[in-house]
Amino acid sequence: DGGITQSPKYLFRKEGQNVTLSCEQNLNHDAMYWYRQDPGQGLRLIYYSQIVNDFQKGDIAEGYSVSREKKESFPLTVTSAQKNPTAFYLCASRHRGVLTEAFFGQGTRLTVV
Amino acid sequence: AQTVTQSQPEMSVQEAETVTLSCTYDTSESDYYLFWYKQPPSRQMILVIRQEAYKQQNATENRFSVNFQKAAKSFSLKISDSQLGDAAMYFCAYDQFYFGTGTSLTVIP
């Protein structure tokens, strides 16, 4: 089945540790996105990538890093520089083209203690 | 930067009735794309409807339709014949980059 997969669903880390969230899609989509969702704040764009080996910062990129070495994969690293990393993280992908439908993963809930 | 505002944090509707969710946005662009997404308790985001600003005609998808007022920068979502399965958070989005804070819709049996 085609789709977009985020793993793990729940993730716990100690403060000061870097952590990488996985996002994989087998839809042959060019564009991929990472969002952060906090209560009462909707979705905020962290990073996005339109093609392999290229990505751009969103509104809240500080404390995060990404890579796009393969079309299928767009991992997000939450670094120790991120002040408030505990949140729900969503990954999405879509074909290139502005009106195409975006498909979302099921999300990763990251808790930093 | 573009902004998207949803002024109704919570809304409720009786089953089979009609409800309208509001969304306004700010942009200096002349052509752009707007979306409504639904997020049920499972937190899986699902596209409800999309609209290209260049097109005057309001988009419609079965029971879902929009009222797009470009001059007023307004993009409201109308849900007709509401069903229990429509209960969810609804997010308005400007392209894939800017989302509103969401409206929680409750459907009353």
Image (cartoon, coloured by chain):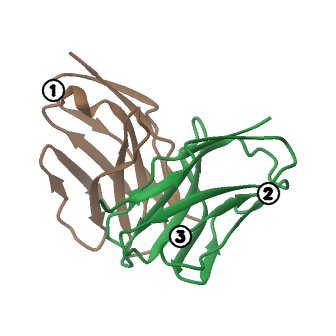
- Quadrant, the N terminus of chain A: bottom left
Residue B96 visible here: no
Identify the hue of chain B.
brown
The percent position of residue A41, horizontal first and vertical second, equals 58, 42
Q: Nearer the viewer, mark 3 or mark 2?
A: 3
Q: Chain of mark 3?
A: A
**Height in image: B79 above or below A30?**
above
Q: Chain of mark 2?
A: A
* Circle 2 SS class: loop
Q: Amino acid at mark 3?
A: Ser
Mark 3 is surrounded, within 10 Å at the Cα level, by few (under 14), some (14 to 19) or many (20 or more) other residues, namely some
Identify the hue of chain A.
green
Q: Amino acid at mark 1?
A: Glu
Identify the residue under disc 2.
Answer: A79
The percent position of residue A56, horizontal first and vertical second, equals 63, 75
Q: Nearer the viewer, mark 1 or mark 2?
A: 2
